[in-house]
Structures are given as structure tokens and as C-alpha cells.
Image: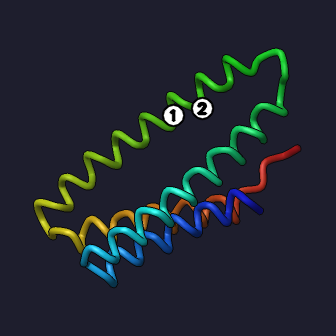
Amino acid sequence: MTIGAGVALVAVGFLDFALLPNLTGLIIGVIVIDFGVQLSMVSHQARIFALEPAARSRINTVFMTALFSVGAMGSGAASIAWVNGGWLAVSLLGLGAALLGLAVHLLWHPRR
């Protein structure tokens, strides 16, 4: 539940960026996105650390490597969006990525 709430907050932050393209919107959006990312990340780590206590450092290495790699791809995509559509395109890209992540979270049910 907290993972979904965190991802939803990230989507709300990017929606704020798209709807309020000014300093106030930027401040509110950054705070909301930061809270959502932290909530989701801590919840993910709590879940993965419960998988195998003896392998926590290895699991965290994979988690952080994947997180960094996807973040780097997002930065590259945002650069392309900026060149082609400016702030609105970047905001919509972030919103789309967050909504995709939320859909995967809600629809994916691995075997336990």
C-alpha cells in the first residue's frame, strides 16, 4: 500500500509541474515528488530486505544499481523531451513514467 501511495505522490508532483509551470508549482511539486520517492524507496527496501536476511547487501546492490540505471535513462529521456517540448514535455514524461510504474505495481502479482 505504501509503495503505491509513494508512486501516486510522484505522479501528483509531475501533474503539479504540468499544471503550475511557475515557481510555486516547482516548490510544491519538488516537495511532493521527494516525499513520494522516499516513501516508495523505503517501502521497497523494507520489502526486499525481508526476502533473505543473509543476502541484504547483495540484494541492496542490485536494487540500487537498478534504481540508478533507470534514473539515468529517465534523465536521458528528459533531456530529449526538453529539447523537443520544453517544461511541459518533461512534466508529462515524468507523469507518464509514474503512471506506468503505478500500473505495474497495481497489476503485477508475483507468486509468494
SS for callout 2: helix
Disc number for residue 63: 2
Residue drawn at the location 59% of the way across and 69% of the way down: 8
Circles 2 and 1: CB atoms closer than 8 Å: yes
Front residue of 92/35: it is 35
Q: Residue 20, percent across and down? A: 31, 82
Residue drawn at the location 15% of the way across and 68% of the way down: 86
Q: Is residue 106 left or right of residue 35?
A: right
Q: Answer with the quarter of the image where residue 108 lies.
A: bottom right
Q: Residue furthest right?
A: 112
Amino acid type of the residue tagged 1 in the rendering: Ala
Front residue of 8/30: it is 30
In this figure, which residue is indicated by the disc labeled 1? 66
Q: Is residue 82 left or right of residue 73?
A: left
> Which quarter of the rendered picture does the C terminus lie within?
top right
Using a 10 Å C-alpha cutoff, classify the residue at mark 2 as few (fewer than 14 neighbours), some (14 to 19) or many (20 or more).
some
Using a 10 Å C-alpha cutoff, classify the residue at mark 1 as few (fewer than 14 neighbours), some (14 to 19) or many (20 or more).
few
Q: Residue 30, percent across and down? A: 41, 62
Residue drawn at the location 48% of the way across and 61% of the way down: 33
Q: Answer with the quarter of the image where residue 50 lies.
A: top right
Residue drawn at the location 59% of the way across and 50% of the way down: 38
Q: CA distance from mark 2 to mark 1?
A: 5 Å
> Which quarter of the rendered picture does the N terminus lie within?
bottom right
109 lies above or below 59: below
Disc number for residue 10: none
Amino acid type of the residue tagged 2 in the rendering: Phe
90 lies above or below 39: below
